[in-house]
Image (cartoon, grey):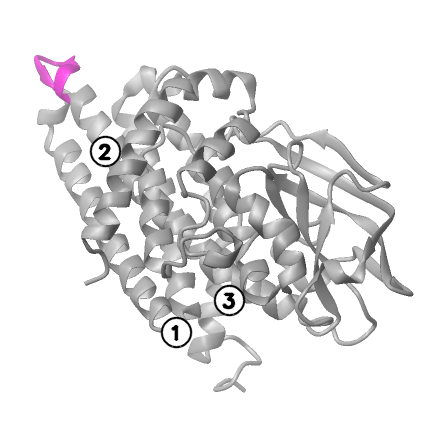
Amino acid sequence: MLFTADHDHIRRSLQKFIAGEINPHVDEWEKADIFPAHELFKKMGSLGFLGLNKPVEFGGSGLDYSYALMMAEELGAITCGGVPMAIGVQTDMATPALARFGSDEVRGEFLSPSISGDYVACIGVSEPGAGSDVASIKTNARSDGDDYVINGGKMWITNGTQADWICLLANSGDGPVHRNKSLICVPMKSKGVTVARKLDKMGMRSSDTAQIFFDNVRVPKRNRIGEEGKGFTYQMIQFQEERLWGAAACLKAHEYIINETIEYTRNRKAFGKSILDNQVVHFKLAEMQTEVELLRALIYRAAEQLVAGEDVTKLATMAKLKAGRLGRELTDACLQYWGGMGFTNETPVSRAYRDSRLTSIGGGADEVMLMVLCKMMGTLPGSKGNA
């Protein structure tokens, strides 16, 4: 059994926090195109939500990954996609490799304040010419004595305008592209770091997303996470938690839209009866609820294997792929049943329609997920089992 009474205790606390401290402010944050990350994260850190599965010696609770997954699922009850995504960047995208492979010194400097909520973190992997193709990044960290000198740029960086530090993937050597990269903790206040602009996005409006440039940014090599040249490997490991998190955060969000659509179509009349009374509508909503439950089973299975120390690349990839595809189908169908109101920004279904679209792009596009799966199946041209 994945969840216990201890999980339920934390779950109830998180539900109360979301209902009292987040959802009442979501509409305001969506209109402002940003939310107060430092203020919110400090509140969450004080309650222990930002380090459930992080080491106790750095302020975490030392629990296993199932607690982080439980939190991701509960964050789906936030009535927008931007805020939970920003929280997920802090807990499951920018810090897992640091927690697992970082030295005590670098964890003390960057992980501890991220767990307490004193620091806001972001993850710097994607670039304008290298999104899902991580191996093709161009940002360079040149060795200069005891320092790295960093030049390049990153794109689509969640929390980027408010972050105190960035977990940066950069080329630190001249070897093969999968063995020449390092993950480096870079303070955003470092000389030469420039937040060029905040991006104007279709969805995830309450989450700030930045383009960032690095011009001869000097950081000590002690800020490196783990071994030099292992950054690509660390990031691939980190991606598994990110992709599972992204899938889990969709579950309650999808159920919320199904339930809101049921209520709206039950009360909306057309041709003398409620929209919900049409078989095509209530059958489709039943199918969508079934798909959500199937996705939940896949995610839980992957989480059980991750807790057991097994490689979950295949299942996490499947979950990420399915979550993105389901989000597109579900929100499109539900928006249709809202009619003209679905095309206005004042309804929850239109926000979900815009926000959910990112799941098929961020953290590896659908097409990359399919390539990973085909490679594991031996059906990708050039992979094992193919001519």
Report the front residue among 340 and 61: 61
Reply yes or no: does residue 385 show up in magenta.
no
* Mark 3 Cα shell of 10 Å, populated few (<14), some (14-19), many (≥20): some
Q: Residue at x 33, y 23 (%)?
A: 20
Quadrant containing the C terminus is bottom right
* Mark 1 Cα shell of 10 Å, populated few (<14), some (14-19), many (≥20): few
Q: Is residue 375 left or right of residue 197?
A: left
Report the front residue among 357 and 253: 253
Secondary element under disc 3, as helix, strand or loop, is: helix
Residue 210 visible in the picture: yes
**Mark on residue 371?**
3
Residue identifier under label 1: 309
Amino acid type, mark 1: Gly
Quadrant containing the N terminus is bottom left
* Residue range (magenta): 266-274
Report the front residue among 366 and 114: 114
Amino acid type, mark 2: Ile
Secondary element under disc 2, as helix, strand or loop, is: helix
Q: Is residue 117 above or below residue 131?
A: above
Instruction: Return the x and y of residue 38 as percentages of the image width and height.
Output: 56, 30
Residue 326 visible in the picture: no
Report the front residue among 339 and 92: 92
Residue identifier under label 2: 258
The CA distance from mark 3 to mark 1 is 24 Å
Whichever of labels 3 and 1 marks the residue nearer the N terminus, that label is 1
Reply yes or no: does residue 269 show up in magenta.
yes
Amino acid type, mark 3: Met
Callout in the foreground (2, 3):
2
Q: Residue at x 58, y 44 (%)?
A: 113
Instruction: Return the x and y of residue 385 as percentages of the image width and height.
Output: 48, 86
The CA distance from mark 2 to mark 3 is 31 Å
